[in-house]
Amino acid sequence: MEPHYLNIQNLKITIFQAYLFWENIEKNLQNIGLRLQGGVREKTDLIVLPEMFNTGFTMRAEELAEDMDGKTMQWIKKTAANYDCVVTGSLIIKEDGKYFNRMVWVKPNGECTHYDKHHLFGLGDEDKHFSPGNEAVIVELKGWKIRLAICYDLRFPVWLRNKDAAYDILLLVASWPDKRSSHWRTLIHARAIENQSYVIGVNRVGHDGNQIYHSGHSMCIDPMGNTVYYKPEDEDLYTFSINYAELEKIRRQFPFLKDSDDFDIN
């Protein structure tokens, strides 16, 4: 009998390192839609958009929040159906009187899973405007197990620890400023190596409404710390593939996860 990993296909991932128009939902959805239309020329399994891709990283939650049936969610569902793939990214959602920085995972049939950002960025007052999520979320796509995370989560290795090899990919969407880009690049490599997983980080580019510059540096790093994809500075729409057998090979050759500490998060 063949090992199960031989039956898991390569995963084809399209990331859009986008320029975002500040607090302009209509213009962002239009721009992203046009870029996808002109740039996605082959079948893909997953399209990844940055953190708060429809507004930019804003604290005006009350004015810009939508519900789970709002304009942006309808757009995502339509886009997932049009490209016959999963679409993911984060946006501001209002639910039960609270505001969440929510990463949605939308399948072509409209089915949706979500992760609410756990570590809110206190330096930018995110904790004053949003409620934290407390659930770690792992989704599955074509046999791959994918842990969802948002931006500031990257700094907290305990929260993202790959206990019992629970995930194969750590997927981060972000609005990470250029002046701390060296942290971004270093931490993504560290998370990939220590968790023996692929790490995919999708950032934005350009200035936001607070004149904070974002230089991209979106990337995919393999479990050995090698670069699969990397793009600084410019807006970029790019599709690449990752291989499950290679992941399994690395984990068999270097069985480090089994020696990791056991712990519980309160």
Image: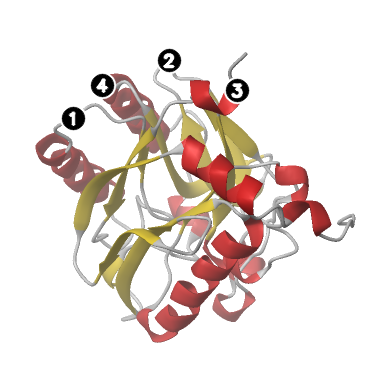
Mark 2 / mark 4, whichever is N-terminal: 4
The residue shown at (13%, 41%) is 39
Say which residue label 1 marks: 42
Element carrying mark 3: helix
Say which residue label 2 marks: 109
Judge the density around disc 2: few (<14), some (14-19), many (≥20) Cα neighbours within 10 Å. Answer: few
Mark yes or no: residue 41 visible: yes
Front disc: 1 or 3: 3
**Nearer to the camera, 121 or 66:** 121
Element carrying mark 2: loop
Distance, label 1 to label 2, CA atoms, is: 20 Å
Say which residue label 3 marks: 4
Report the amino acid beneath label 2: Asn
Mark 1 / mark 3, whichever is N-terminal: 3
Judge the density around disc 1: few (<14), some (14-19), many (≥20) Cα neighbours within 10 Å. Answer: few
Say which residue label 4 marks: 82
Whole-percent x, y for residue 56 in the image: 37, 61
Q: What kind of colouring is applied to the model shown?
A: secondary structure
Whole-percent x, y for residue 44 in the image: 29, 30
Mark 4 / mark 3, whichever is N-terminal: 3
Distance, label 1 to label 3, CA atoms, is: 27 Å
Front disc: 2 or 3: 3
Front disc: 1 or 2: 1
**Nearer to the camera, 260 or 166:** 260
Element carrying mark 1: loop
Q: Is residue 137 left or right of residue 174?
A: right
Question: Which of the 4 quarters of the picture holds residue 138?
Answer: top right
The residue shown at (68%, 56%) is 131
